[in-house]
Image (cartoon, rainbow, N blue to C red):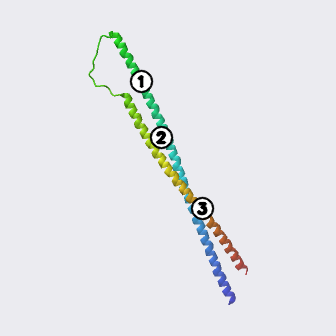
């Protein structure tokens, strides 16, 4: 009868230990899954940051291209003005300067002003886009830093808990071996 009580007690203790071991394994699996999820989130945010860097580079190239186009248009305007002045001189020299022509047409648009207005408008758009991208980039960097900090803390906590669970499992295994040997 005494041996039966020892067997029942040992069986109950064994079942408790097995349950503790299963719980420890489940907890470790939960932490592993959480770590993997955090890793995926971090990789996604890093990919977003790289995409933003590419967008910022593209906007910078677009601005440079627009500035080049603007300079080209200015040069073309200067050349057209010179050609016009030369043609006017030639016409005046052919007529001997005696002919006076009055034109009652409204003056044409000031191309330099139009080009400067366009340039200012494009620069404002580019600056606005750059500010928006930089602001968005800064927000994303802050989010990533917060997530990395949280993930690091979670990993440290998880590592500590896994270490504690391993220690507990080893103690339980030692207890089990001790009970099995008695």
Residue located farthest toward the right when viewing the structure as drawn: 181
| Circle 3/circle 1 CB separation < 8 Å | no
Q: Where is residue 3 in the image (x, y as percent from the top left)?
A: 69, 87
What is the crowding at mark 2: few (fewer than 14 residues within 10 Å), some, or many (at least 20)?
some
Q: The N terminus appears in which quarter of the rendering?
A: bottom right
| SS category of the residue bearing label 1 | helix
Would residue 79 be found to the left or right of residue 166 on screen?
left
Q: Where is residue 28 in the image (x, y as percent from the top left)?
A: 60, 66
Residue located farthest toward the top when viewing the structure as drawn: 96
Q: Position of residue 16 (x, y in %)?
A: 62, 78
Residue located farthest toward the bottom when viewing the structure as drawn: 1
When asked about the image quadrant of residue 179, the answer is bottom right
| SS category of the residue bearing label 3 | helix
| SS category of the residue bearing label 2 | helix
Q: The C terminus appears in which quarter of the rendering?
A: bottom right
Which residue does the image show at 52% across and 53% down from the upper left?
142
When asked about the image quadrant of residue 157, the answer is bottom right
Which residue does the image show at 45% across and 46% down from the upper left?
132
Nearer to us of marks 3 and 1 is 1
Say which of 55 and 5 sits in front: 55
Residue under circle 2? Answer: 59
Say which of 110 and 65 sits in front: 110
Nearer to us of marks 2 and 1 is 1
Give the Cα separation between the discs numbered 2 and 1: 29 Å
Q: Where is residue 62 in the image (x, y as percent from the top left)?
A: 47, 37
Give the Cα separation between the discs numbered 2 and 3: 38 Å
Whether 130 is drawn above or below 108: the answer is below
Would residue 86 be found to the left or right of residue 49 on screen?
left
Which residue does the image show at 69% across and 89% down from the upper left?
2
Say which of 103 and 38 sits in front: 103
Label at residue 78: 1
Residue under circle 3? Answer: 155
């Amino acid at each position: 009868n005494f041996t039966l009580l020892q067997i029942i007690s040992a069986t109950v203790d064994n079942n408790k230990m097995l349950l503790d071991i299963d719980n420890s394994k489940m907890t470790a699996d939960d932490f592993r899954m959480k770590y993997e999820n955090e890793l995926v989130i971090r990789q996604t945010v890093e990919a977003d940051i790289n995409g933003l860097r590419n967008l910022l580079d593209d906007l910078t190239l677009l601005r440079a291209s627009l500035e080049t186009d603007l300079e080209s248009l200015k040069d073309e305007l200067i050349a057209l003005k010179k050609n016009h002045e030369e043609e006017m001189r030639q016409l005046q020299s052919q007529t001997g300067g005696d002919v006076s022509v009055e034109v009652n047409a409204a003056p044409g648009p000031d191309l330099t002003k139009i080009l400067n207005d366009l340039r200012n408008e494009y620069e404002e758009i580019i600056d606005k886009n750059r500010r928006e991208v930089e602001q968005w980039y800064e927000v994303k960097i802050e989010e990533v830093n917060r997530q990395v900090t949280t993930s690091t803390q979670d990993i440290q906590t998880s590592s500590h808990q896994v270490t504690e669970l391993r220690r507990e499992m080893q103690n339980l295994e030692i207890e089990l071996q001790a009970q099995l040997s008695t």
